[in-house]
Amino acid sequence: MGIQIRTNEAKESSIPGVFACGDVARVPHSVSLAVGDGAWAGAQLHRSLVWPES
Ligand SMILES: Cc1cc2nc3c(=O)[nH]c(=O)nc-3n(C[C@H](O)[C@H](O)[C@H](O)COP(=O)(O)OP(=O)(O)OC[C@H]3O[C@@H](n4cnc5c(N)ncnc54)[C@H](O)[C@@H]3O)c2cc1C
């Protein structure tokens, strides 16, 4: 499965401001799950920049 980065439900890693998605941050490996993961991580990254305290 390769290297796996542990993330929280917002796809943020243990390093604040660093997000991970797709194969590197989930199993099973699948195109559709990776695409959804990317959309979710992008939305959460945006949220963290606009509302850093939430
Ligand atoms: C042989 C095979 C068959 C598969 N068949 C299917 C299937 O039929 N259906 C299905 O849903 N899924 C299938 N998968 C799984 C699917 O390919 C993956 O789940 C999906 O591609 C994950 O997308 P990703 O964007 O997370 O990662 P990737 O598609 O692996 O993209 C990661 C990208 O990051 C780049 N990269 C890596 N390190 C660095 C770096 N240091 N700097 C810059 N860029 C970097 C890589 O070159 C790569 O382009 C298959 C996988 C394999 C290996």
Image (cartoon, grey):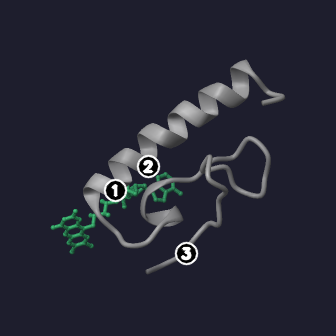
Where is 36 relative to 31, above or below? above
**Mark 3 near mark 2, Cβ–Cβ under 8 Å?**
no
Q: Is mark 2 within 8 Å of ligand 1?
A: yes
Query: In terms of sequence position, does the residue under pointer 3 or pointer 1 come before the other?
Result: 3
Could you say which disc has been placed on residue 23 in the image? none
In the image, is 12 to the left or to the right of 23? Answer: right
Amino acid found under the numbered disc labelled 2: Asp
Distance from the alpha carbon under mark 3 to that under mark 2: 17 Å
Residue nearest the viewer, comparing 13 with 47: 47
Where is 9 relative to 38, above or below? below
Q: Residue at x 48, y 40 (%)?
A: 40
Q: Which residue is mark 3?
A: 3
Q: Quadrant of residue 45?
A: top right
In the image, which is nearer the foreground, mark 3 or mark 1? 1
Q: Quadrant of residue 27?
A: bottom left
Q: Which residue is mark 2?
A: 37
**Mark 2 near mark 1, Cβ–Cβ under 8 Å?**
yes
Q: Residue at x 70, y 55 (%)?
A: 13
Quadrant position of the N terminus in the picture: bottom left
In the image, is 18 to the left or to the right of 34? Answer: right
Q: Is mark 1 within 8 Å of ligand 1?
A: yes
Could you say which disc has been placed on residue 33 in the image? 1
**Mark 3 near mark 1, Cβ–Cβ under 8 Å?**
no
Q: Kindly state the secondary structure of the residue where label 1 is placed.
A: helix
